[in-house]
Amino acid sequence: MDWKLPFSPGVRRLVTAAALLALALTWVVDILAVFNPGQPSSPARWVPVFVTGPLAALALPDTRWSPSLTARSLGIAAMSVALTCVCLVDPRPVGDWGLLEILALLFLIVRVLAETESDRTTAWTAGALVAAVLMMPLRGRTVFSLVAGQYVLTVALALAVLIGCSLRALEARRRRAVQEVRYAERLALARDLHDLIAHHMTGIIVQANAARTVHAISPEKVDPALEAISRSGTETLESMRRLVRVLREDDHQALRPADLLSGLGDLVAGFSRRRPDAPAARLEAGAAARTSRFSPEVETSVYRVVQEALTNVHRHAPGERVVVRLDADPDWLHVTVANSLPHRRTGSPAGGQSGLGLIGLRERVEALDGEFWAGAVDPARWEVRASVPRSPDSPPHPPRPARSARGATRTAR
């Protein structure tokens, strides 16, 4: 059950513990009530306590063997309605309704409204659960039980529906924000693709015109010109096949080829100057990364990853140590930005915690058939990693980074 709410893991664990405690205490109240000697004895009285109530509570969490949430919800609703019908025909008085069953049904309503994707499935599944809850006062078979029960349950249902719809709207807004970021990123990448292809095509046209000019007076110079045209055309096709993404920075100036190390050096130095009281950031580069040349789209993508990662460090972990590492192998260029985590939370950073910057980075890296990962590798360190292929061929995927057991791969800063 992951609604991607803007809460810290500690707050989420606290909410889960509170829900479990509420269910446990409610079940204890049910058990004490069913063994009250002053109450009439009836099978329909202990079934909600020991059958439908616990089953409804067990239907709340997701497990590996659990049916879908819709199937579980409909099954619990059908059992609850069937029990209500049995209570109506049982000549013996029933008494209590089953508080654990009611609370679990309300939680199921919240989950169905918040998580079920199809609007139609959400409507009729939540409707079945609501009908099951509203029919419970009929088990008392008294006017007071019906009126008072309907009033209390209507208020509780209104709160559950409000919470579920609010969570659904929050998730819908988050998805729209993610889609808008990806769409804007793709528009920028398409514009930069046009710029790079236009550069290649301009060179091809100039070389073709030069070949036509020298053909009559120096035929021996035509072959080198044709080879240059072929080479430029091959580079253009490689760029198209790899969905070249030359990424403009805020000043609309792209990083020039072979300037990656100097650009990263300036970026890291500027980042260190912004934090005079913190340890200086370090840039490390392997021998292969220092001596190799990479395509413009690869260099600008790596530059953008480092820039966004350093921005996140400045916002979320000011004053912590930062190391930028660049490595290369025959097929891949790897970049890692690692920083130590603050010992205590510094509050909400400026600009909030949307995590949309990392979504844009993932879009850029995956557009080059690369891999991107960000998360906490241990309680004291955060890393942003990107691996981008160096050549247009499709090499095997590099080993994926080790991911912590705490599920850091889903964390966005």
Image: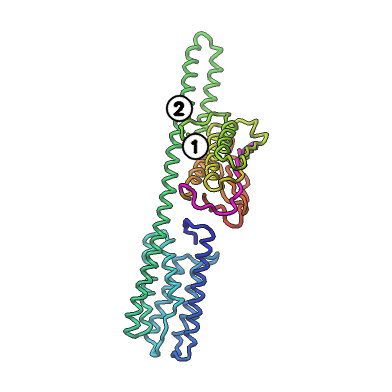
The residue located at (56%, 34%) in the rendering is: 299
Tell me, for residue 220, which label it has, or none. Answer: none
Q: Which residue is mark 1?
A: 243
Is residue 339 shown in magenta? Answer: yes
Q: Position of residue 400 (x, y in %)?
A: 61, 48
Q: Position of residue 348 (x, y in %)?
A: 49, 52
Can residue 177 be seen from the camera position used here? yes
Q: Secondary structure at mark 1?
A: loop
Say if 380 sits above or below 99 in the image. Answer: above
Name the residue nearer the viewer: 359 or 51.
Answer: 359
Tell me, for residue 198, which label it has, or none. Answer: 2
Q: Tell me, what colour scheme is on the image? A: rainbow
Say if 341 sits above or below 275 in the image. Answer: below
Q: Residues within 10 Å of mark 2 (few under 14, many from 20)?
A: few
The residue located at (57%, 50%) in the rendering is: 375
Q: CA distance from mark 1 to mark 2?
A: 14 Å
Q: Residue placed farthest to the top in the image?
A: 217
Tell me where residue 149 sits by quadrant: bottom left
Q: Look at the image and give the residue range highlighted in magenta.
A: 327-351
Q: Position of residue 201 (x, y in %)?
A: 47, 25
Name the residue nearer the viewer: 342 or 229.
Answer: 342
Say if 216 sits above or below 109 in the image. Answer: above
Q: Amino acid at mark 1?
A: Leu
Say if 151 sits above or below 377 in the image. Answer: below
The residue located at (62%, 42%) in the rendering is: 279
Q: Residue placed farthest to the front in the image?
A: 277
Can residue 302 be seen from the camera position used here? no
